[in-house]
Image: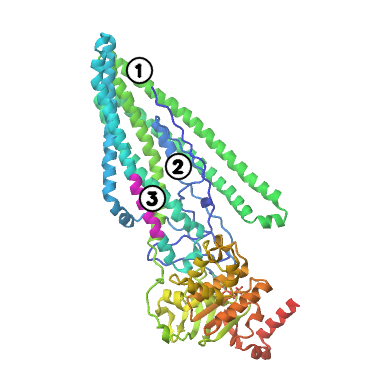
Amino acid sequence: MLLPLLLRALSPRAGLRSVPPALRPPLGPGRSFRYGGGRLGLTSAPPRPAGPAPPARYCLLLAGPAAGCVALGLLGTAARCQEAAVPAVPIPAVPEPAQPRPEPTFDWPAFWTFLRPQLLALSAAVVLALGAALLNVRIPVLLGQLVNVVARCARGPVTGYLQEVRRPALRLLTVYCLQGLLTFGYIALLARVGEQVAGNMRKALFTNLLRQDVAFFDANRTGQLVNRLTADIQEFKSSFKLAISQGLRSSTQTAGCFVSLYLLSPKLTGLLLVALPALVAAGALIGAALRSLSRRAQEQVAKATVVADEVLGNVRTVRAFAMEDRQAGLFCAEVDRAGWLSEQLGLGIAAFQGLSNLALNGIVLGTIFVGGSLMAGDELSPGDLMSFLVASQTVQRSLANISILLGQVVRGLSAGARVFELLTLEPSVALRGGGSIPSHSLLGRICFHRVSFSYPTRPGYLVLRDFSLTLPPCKTVAIVGPSGGGKSTVAALLERFYEPTQGTITLDGRDISSLDPSWLRGQVIGFISQEPVLFGTTIMENIRFGKPGASDAEVYAAAQLANADGFIRSFPEGYDTVVGERGTALSGGQKQRIAIARALLKDPAILILDEATSALDAQSEKVVQEALDRAAAGRTVLLIAHRLSTIRGADLIVVLAQGRVAEAGTHEELLRRGGLYAELIRRQTKDQS
Ligand SMILES: Nc1ncnc2c1ncn2[C@@H]1O[C@H](COP(=O)(O)OP(=O)(O)OP(=O)(O)O)[C@@H](O)[C@H]1O
């Protein structure tokens, strides 16, 4: 009487997670960042940490055969994909070589802070789980007693049967009910604890991510960070719940049932103790081989996913080059290879399953054979043999659960370690803290004093060298120059997205590094970029993003100033129009005007316009330019532009080349000088004509 084998083949969870990410994971608390590749170049990265959800996992849960499970439970161990090594774009300074980074270690004290509030519910769940496990140990014994009574009655008169059988049957029924109740209790409690812990971890992680330096986001892919928030926390939660429920229950059952087995028959227990370890060892060996095959199959599925992701994500380019057939061929080849490996794995699992069935049925047969001879010698009753068989099945099932659990716990711990690594990461510049200048005395005079800067992702490559510039209050200063000359970097430094490597930036004579960054960004500087980013909510909410407490009247006023009120009111829903994901339901010019309104709502003393009109067609540019001209009045404006026609009226034009101010003056002065600016104007006029 062998319990049926349950085959639980977990469906392949091929996800982008497994796509080799070309990025360097963040470092732990108190450590400085090591950056490798730049924005364009990807250096060979360390091996991907064990992912929470391996793409294709084959795992067998054998309710009976423990050895099979012991081996196959190990199959679940996550595969690690080696990241693709892509040659870096050459840069002047040799970057620090990418080195494989050790996996982060699990931060138990940090975990404790999340667990502590749930201690009461957790303790109750542990007690209930232990109770359920102990009752499970009792069940085979009670079953044996019932069988003994039934066997005795079978030989005696039928009239006394109900009388005899009632007590042991009721006892068994009570234990069954109690066990069901306890199981319900501990699973419900654990679900609550797990959700609370995971929810709190998610909230804390998201909050901490938002505090990080911009350089951190340069070095880490958004997809991977989102994965930490979702998949890693999910994996950690599942492992945590499993460790408590299955782990506690299975180990208690194993220990308890072994005691029962020994009490029932020391001889039969000895036989089991010889057979089980041998089976476990053989299972572990075969399991290791299958695990390696499974890992290769997973990696192959991930490769196919990479191809699909790239092709579908760039379908316009594929179409433009008529490469559909070729790309489909590439994908099919990868899928075929993955299929072949998975078939091999399936074959291995099938053989293994058959062998473990045979072995474990053999154990049952052996138990009945030896048990029968013990019964013949009056050393064992039929009930005892029944109890022995059921208890040994419980042991096998528990061992199977434990073996699967081990792989799951390893994965959960490494997922948790990755989450806590980010949770405890401290930004180099806090979001808040520092002085501010009262609004009535704020002039808006900005000075860059001999600023040098290299991006943290490209240490040694100087983007700005000894850069000095003064923006007088209420004047417009335009920065022009060749692409990659460092214009946007000047704006990013003023916003304190990065800190200068050398030199200082002052606002009204005060070093901005001593000022409160949130005050600076939230109240002093308005930033309008080339690609306005809107949120998928209403126009009203998007504009109000500039100043959360603003009244409707203030929002309307800002929209009027930004030349946006007219088109907004022409929509049937007016200001309540939902702009779609990232503002897809609006034209480029409309989006830009909403972004201008958003920036103007906080009435900033300083306005940064980073190529705010360069992505627009001539018609939209005209409307947006009008809005910008209006918005610029009475503010210090830093204007970054490609189209030189938009900056003619600036009070000062600075030509930035190779990180330095190459020349500066008004439009007329620079034209007269006949230098770089005059050359840029000449080239642009030629291009236009
Ligand atoms: N986040 C970043 N990490 C690393 N390097 C960067 C980053 N942003 C820009 N760079 C590099 O810094 C240099 C200056 O870039 P920046 O965007 O400031 O130039 P730009 O003058 O504004 O160029 P464009 O006119 O093309 O927008 C470039 O070599 C660029 O590759």
Tell me what residue is drawn at x 47 percent, y 60 percent.
25
- Mark 1 → mark 3, Cα distance in angstroms: 44 Å
Of the 4 image quadrants, the one containing the N terminus is top left
Q: Position of residue 17 (x, y in %)?
A: 51, 52
Can residue 161 be seen at all in this image of the molecule? yes
Vertical placement of 632 versus 47: above or below?
below
Q: Which mark is residue 328?
A: none
- Mark 1 → mark 2, Cα distance in angstroms: 36 Å
Q: Is residue 200 magenta?
A: yes
Q: Amino acid at mark 3?
A: Leu
Q: Amino acid at mark 2?
A: Gly
- Mark 2 → mark 3, Cα distance in angstroms: 14 Å
Q: Which mark is residue 413?
A: 3
Vertical placement of 130 versus 675: above or below?
above
- How packed mark 2 is, by other alpha carbons closer than 10 Å (few <14, some 14-19, many 20 or more), is many
Q: Position of residue 193 (x, y in %)?
A: 33, 48
Between 530 and 26, the one nearer to me in the picture: 530
Classify the position of ligand 1 by quadrant: top left, top right, bottom left or bottom right.
Answer: bottom right
For disc 2, the marked residue is: 76
Between 48 and 682, the one nearer to me in the picture: 682
Between 70 and 271, the one nearer to me in the picture: 70
